[in-house]
Image (cartoon, rainbow, N blue to C red):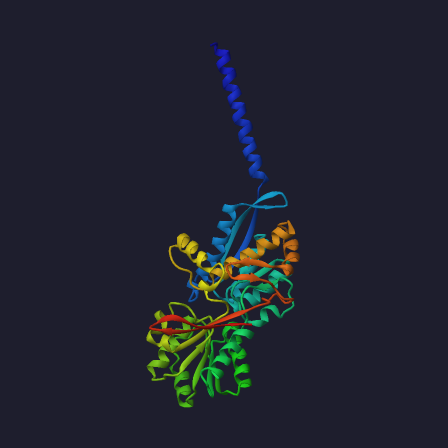
Amino acid sequence: MSTSTVLGRGMATVCILGVSAAAAVGVARADEMVKIGEAAPVTGPASYLGKDTENGARLAIEEINQTGLVIGGKKVTLVFDAQDDAGDPRQATQVAQKLVDDKVVAVVGHMQSGSTIPASKIYSDAGIAQVSPSATNPAYTQQGFKTAYRVVATDAQQGPTLADYAAKTLKVKTVAIVDDSTAYGQGLAVEFEKQAKANGITVLSHDASTDKAVDFRAILTKIKGEKPDVIMYGGLDGTGGPFAKQAKQLGMTMKVLAGDGLCADDLAKLAGDAADNVICSIAGAPLLKMSGGPAFVERYKKRFGYAPVLNSPFAYDAVGVIIDAMKRAQSTEPAKILAAMPATDHQGVLGETQFDAKGDLKHGVISLYKYVGGKQALLGVVEQ
């Protein structure tokens, strides 16, 4: 074999490899990288709920990328753009602007109403669909923004459900209300109060605390003197747990009614044995009773090494709703994704998701829980 023959074959091999490499580069360039934004508090007192929210969205995006996504004849790779809003309204608007500047095509978030509402105008101005997995304050979707959606029931459903349970099941005649002055806690408390009064319950007092409070003894001592049948607390478990604990320390044995901000499996870590005095609601069906719930739990555990906390299945389906709109639009352009959102009919972990004209769920579900030995126990499910 001559040297020239060997060199010729070597050059041919190099050429072939060069063509293959170019082809590979061509395929890579043909792929479209599409950013999906997500915002939740991964620092601060609600960080464990925020991380669970982030995990749910992350899992959805990873699974979609693994399965493969083709939009408009082009392979799409989703890029997860997760941001920390720390549960702070001002930081939430900064995060929202960053996500817009990052050119995300849609956003999952924010987690809390107090962050979701101020951020929503920024997404509206940018024409980017915003799907909150957990913001329950009715005001979020009452602003008239065509970009605002949520995959969870609202406090206009959750508050009255708690008030109805108090009146019809607990036979309550009087109540004292405390909220943490946030958009979520105050909104839930107001909706509860309206329905409580409609049910003939006397509201003895309605006090405001803050979401940074650690000592509730002054408010609780006043309430103890009022002798209400129950207390309603609007806020998250970071303050609600200590609130219930301090109430029991003061010898107050009445039930504490609360919303999904308190309704986590590990409430007992914050409330101690006072968790057994808490009755709370979650704006959604029990995870294991959701159509895709059991399978979701197993996939979540395998990916993250622990069980879902609260918001992750909602964040997971929020991603699914966005991708469903993208598929129907056959486009990754924010305006076309947004235009497809109203016709959503998505089957996911939560079951069927459809939206009304405001961006709220057509069919909301509220679950009620009590605690026994510090462990959450289902009381019942109310379909709206």
Residue 197 location (% of width, % of height):
54, 85
Q: Which is nearer the eye, 181 or 68?
A: 68
Above or below — where is 235 with respect to 10? Answer: below
Q: In this rendered view, identify the residue nearer to me: 254 or 344.
A: 344
Q: Is residue 109 left or right of residue 267?
A: right
Residue 123 placement (x, y as % from top left): 60, 60
Q: Quadrant of the C terminus?
A: bottom right
The residue depicted at 45 percent of the width and 76 percent of the height is 258
Q: Position of residue 185 (x, y in %)?
A: 49, 74
In the displayed structure, 318 sits above or below 197; it is: above
- In the displayed structure, would residue 173 be above or below residue 59? below
Q: Is residue 220 left or right of residue 362?
A: left
Q: Residue 370, image x and y in percent?
A: 40, 74
Is 242 placed above or below 289 here? below
Count the marks: how many?
0
The foreground one among 204 and 119 is 204
Give the camera-side residue of 25 and 84. Answer: 25
Q: Residue at x 55, y 55 (%)?
A: 320
Left or right of 308: which side holds 126?
A: right
Q: Residue furthest top?
A: 2
